Image (spheres, rainbow, N blue to C red):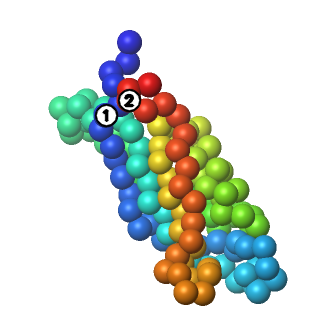
Amino acid sequence: MSPPLRDRIYLHGLEVQAVIGVYVHERAAPRLLRVDLELACDTRSAAASDDLTRTFDYDAIAQRLRQLAASMQPALLETLAERMGELLQREFGARWLRLRLDKPGAVPGTASVGIVIERGLRAAE
């Protein structure tokens, strides 16, 4: 039986660029989006060995999320968030994740709008 996934690796405020939106003016140029990400894992093995291969590589994750965002041109944040979650599970083996995707300045009078998704099983499940 696998150990419970109580530890969390996180990236907060990761900036990515994407052409995204439903309106013509939104599709004219890439815009800044921000990603907050939590990935559940058991960090004990990495801590004991001091070995990066036994945990999530923050830089590799950041690079792949930036590449994905730049390669897509979805209308909806929901679409990009879902593809990011799928990538993290497929390429990095994330068994549980929480991803928040913010679109700053998208709606006048707000700091940001966005979506939060959770995928996979939590530690207690």
Location of residue 106 with respect to 102 vertically, above or below: below
Provide residue 104's location: percent of width, then percent of height. 54, 78
Taking depth in this image into account, of 116 and 63 the one nearest to the observer is: 116
* Residue lying farthest to the left in this orientation: 48
Taking depth in this image into account, of 61 and 114 the one nearest to the observer is: 114
Q: Residue 35: tell me if it is visible.
A: yes
What residue did someone put label 1 on?
A: 6
* Residue depicted at x 18% and y 32%: 48
Using the numbered discs, state the Cα–Cα distance from disc 2 to disc 1 in whole angstroms.
6 Å
Location of residue 16 with respect to 79 vertically, above or below: below
Counting other residues with Cα less than 10 Å from the Cα at mark 2, is it few (<14), some (14-19), or many (20 or more)? Answer: some
Location of residue 97 with respect to 112 vertically, above or below: above
Q: Residue 95: tell me if it is visible.
A: no
Counting other residues with Cα less than 10 Å from the Cα at mark 1, is it few (<14), some (14-19), or many (20 or more)? Answer: few
* Residue depicted at x 49% and y 63%: 35
Q: What residue type is disc 1 on?
A: Arg
Asked if the residue under mark 1 is in contact with the one under mark 2, i.e. CB atoms within 8 Å, the reply is yes
Q: Is residue 4 left or right of residue 87?
A: left
Provide residue 50's location: percent of width, then percent of height. 21, 39
Rendering quarter of residue 14: bottom left
Q: What residue type is disc 2 on?
A: Ala
